[in-house]
Amino acid sequence: MMPLAQMADAVLRCGDGREKTALSRKLAAQWQGARAAGQTPEVGTASPPMQPARPARPELLAPRDVPHRKPGSPEGRIALLHAVAHIELNAVDLHWDIIARFSHVPMPMGFFDDWVKAADEESKHFNLMADCLEEMGSHYGALPAHAGMWRAAEDTAEDLMGRLAVVPMVLEARGLDVTPNMIRIFKQAKADSAVAALETIYAEEVAHVAYGSKWFHFLCGRENADPKEVFHTLVQKYFHGALKPPFNEEKRAEAGIPPDFYWPLAVST
Ligand SMILES: [Fe+2]
Ligand SMILES: [Fe+2]
């Protein structure tokens, strides 16, 4: 079996969405199979690319140039699912990237188990979104998508605590805030498969935020640092902009992020 960091590197270098997620799920199953059999497979090291390989489509545009469509129409709902598919594909890469990028940092095996599981789930999420798009007569790549989603990864490429603070504890936590409203939109449109897919995503994302919080607190504890203070410092350093309420306080609490972590970084809108 390939060392884990090299599995991660291989997924990052695969461009096509469906191929990337197929490889991701296959390698995750290998790792999980070995772990379930009581083995401690090699993590190894890797030199991951600064940016993951991506398909030729979608065209990537600056956020202000991506056309904004109202979700009240079928076109608007396709655009919404397309945006989520794009987020999920980025998430696949983000979870493998934390493994490859920080494989040199001594961490307990559970750290790697968690991100392999998260990467596997993101792969499933991308496929669910791509399936929904195809069911609606579209596909991933049919519309332009946001460029710059990888910025958080680049900014925190040398700072594991910064990565944990910004990616799972800010960006993925934001997903918990906005997904319930998205589910409502698709319920109103009676789009059953999109509702089911988004409910799966919503349920599984709580754990990804929780993994972030767990390992962030672990590292703070190892350095005898105050987690809340470190979180505020790192988010201000690496995250561009303020956090946007309303927050899903219940799910954030379930994921181990207390209100005094995010409220001081918020602006009212
Ligand atoms: Fe996801
Ligand atoms: Fe996630």
Image (cartoon, rainbow, N blue to C red):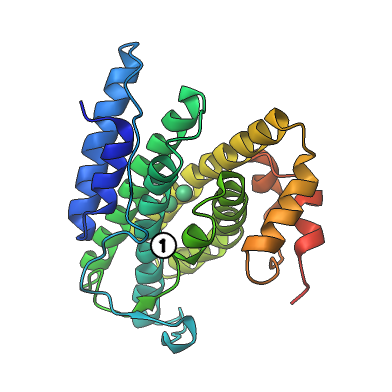
Residue 142 vs residue 189, the one in the foreground: 142
From the top left corner, tell me how far across and down residue 71 is, in percent.
Answer: 45, 78
**Whether residue 176 is situated above or below residue 68 in the rendered picture:** above
In the image, is 136 to the left or to the right of 159?
left
**Whether residue 78 is situated above or below residue 167 in the rendered picture:** below
**Whether residue 33 is situated above or below residue 232 in the rendered picture:** above
Residue beneath the point at 42% across and 45% down = 101
Residue beneath the point at 46% across and 41% down = 102
Location of residue 233 (image quadrant): bottom right
Q: Quadrant of the N terminus?
A: top left
Classify 10 Å Cα crowding around label 1: few (below 14), some (14-19), many (20 and above): some
- Of the residues shown, which amino acid type is indicated by label 1? Ile
From the top left corner, tell me how far across and down residue 39 is, in percent.
Answer: 33, 13
Where does label 1 land, which residue? 87
Q: Quadrant of the C terminus?
A: bottom right
In the image, is 113 to the left or to the right of 257?
left
Residue 139 vs residue 144, the one in the foreground: 144
Residue beneath the point at 32% across and 56% down = 49
Location of residue 256 (image quadrant): top right
Q: Residue furthest top?
A: 38
Residue beneath the point at 58% across and 47% down = 164
In the image, is 247 to the left or to the right of 111?
right
From the top left corner, tell me how far across and down residue 248 is, in percent.
Answer: 67, 55
Query: What is the secondary structure assignment of the residue under circle 1?
Result: helix
Location of residue 51 (image quadrant): bottom left
Mark 1 C-beta to ligand 1 under 8 Å? yes
- Counting the numbered discs, the total is 1
Q: Is residue 247 visible?
A: no
From the top left corner, tell me how far across and down residue 33 is, in percent.
Answer: 27, 21
Q: Is residue 256 visible?
A: yes
In the image, is 254 to the left or to the right of 136?
right
